[in-house]
Image: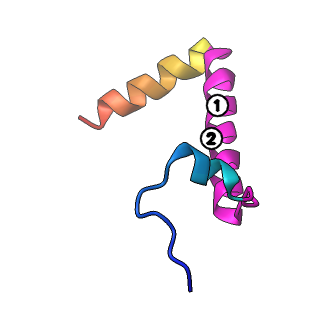
Amino acid sequence: MPQGPAVKTFETFAAEPMRKPRLSHLLALAGLLALLALAFWLYARPGLMVYLAEQLWACF
């Protein structure tokens, strides 16, 4: 079996076929988009942000 170079160079990396995104990658992307949507939703509701900050501060 032929062995490739020990260190991947750009040429060897570019020659490899692209891998399909795995389910874990898609779930991570979906989670990131959900967090971003939550951040924008909370930003649009300042009263809720104040309430949540007060509740969080009450824990300490």
User: In this rendering, would 46 be left or right of 6?
Assistant: right
Residue identified by numbered label 2: 32
Quarter of the image for residue 36 reads top right
Cα–Cα gap, marks 2 and 1 = 6 Å
Query: For the magenta stretch, what is the residue range?
Result: 17-45
Vertical side of 32 occupied by 47: above or below: above
Mark 2: amino acid: Leu
Front residue of 52 and 30: 30
Q: Name the main secondary structure of what is drawn in magenta.
A: helix
The percent coordinates of residue 49 (x first, y second) are 53, 20
Q: How is the image coloured?
A: rainbow
- Residue found 40% across the figure and 24% down from its top: 54
- Bin the neighbour count of mark 2 within 10 Å (Cα to Cα): few under 14, some 14-19, many 20 and up: few
The percent coordinates of residue 27 (x first, y second) are 68, 56
Q: Secondary structure at mark 2?
A: helix
Looking at the rendered image, the quarter that the C terminus falls into is: top left
User: In this rendering, would 50 be left or right of 35?
Assistant: left
Numbered label attached to residue 36? 1
Mark 2 touching mark 1, by CB under 8 A?
yes
The percent coordinates of residue 15 (x first, y second) are 68, 53
Vertical side of 57 occupied by 12: above or below: below
- Residue found 69% across the figure and 38% down from its top: 33
User: In this rendering, would 42 be left or right of 55?
Assistant: right
User: In this rendering, would 2 be left or right of 17?
Assistant: left
